[in-house]
Image (cartoon, rainbow, N blue to C red):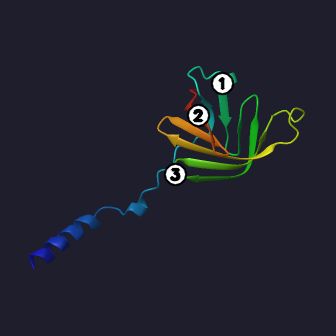
Amino acid sequence: MRQCKILTAIFVALSAFPSAAAFPAVAAESIVGAWSANRACKEIDRIDISSMSLGDEDWYCSFNSVSRKGEVVTWRGRCGSPDVEDDPHPYASTIVARLSGARLYLLENGKSWGAYKRCKK
């Protein structure tokens, strides 16, 4: 009998709190923006990421699909030179970005590009 009263009291106390469904889910941090492997974050050393593309002054990737699971974003599309005259045949590419704390780790077709820090605005 005493256990029943305790369980009833716990149930009543817990029912006073809003359910987890009442709270909005916390969205993962966006990786859109400028990133650099060094502190200077100069344009020459910077990767610019948008929702469906990324690149720098020497290469560019355009994606036709993107997915995200937690802190990992996967893009699929084509990469090559931003200048079509230099590289008229972009290649198929899968880019995987993983955000870990303040660092962004990038892989292209399984090969690491290293770690990047977000550039300050």
Residue furthest to the front in view is: 111
**Residue in the picture at 39% in, 61% down:** 20
Say whether residue 120 is left or right of residue 61.
Answer: left
Quarter of the figure with the C terminus:
top right
Label 1 belongs to which residue? Answer: 45
Say whether residue 66 is left or right of residue 2.
Answer: right
**Residue in the picture at 36% in, 63% down:** 19
Report helix, strand or loop for mark 1.
helix
**Residue in the picture at 15% in, 77% down:** 4
**Circle 2 crowding by C-alpha within 10 Å: few under 14, some 14–19, many from 20:** few
Report helix, strand or loop for mark 2.
strand
The span from disc 1 to disc 3 (Cα, nearest Å) is 27 Å
Say whether residue 17 is left or right of residue 99.
Answer: left
Report helix, strand or loop for mark 3.
loop
The span from disc 1 to disc 2 (Cα, nearest Å) is 13 Å
**Circle 3 crowding by C-alpha within 10 Å: few under 14, some 14–19, many from 20:** few
Task: Please state which amino acid type lies under the numbered disc 3.
Answer: Gly
Mark 1–mark 3 CB contact (< 8 Å): no
From the viewer's perspective, is the residue at label 3 or at label 2 nearer? Answer: 2
Give the percent coordinates (x, y) of residue 115.
Answer: 56, 33
Label 2 belongs to which residue? Answer: 114
Task: Please state which amino acid type lies under the numbered disc 2.
Answer: Gly
Mark 1–mark 2 CB contact (< 8 Å): no
Of label 1 and label 3, which has the lower sequence position? 1
Disc number for residue 70: 3
**Residue in the picture at 9% in, 75% down:** 2
Given residues 84 and 22, the one toward you in this image is 84
From the viewer's perspective, is the residue at label 1 or at label 2 nearer? Answer: 2
The span from disc 3 to disc 2 (Cα, nearest Å) is 20 Å
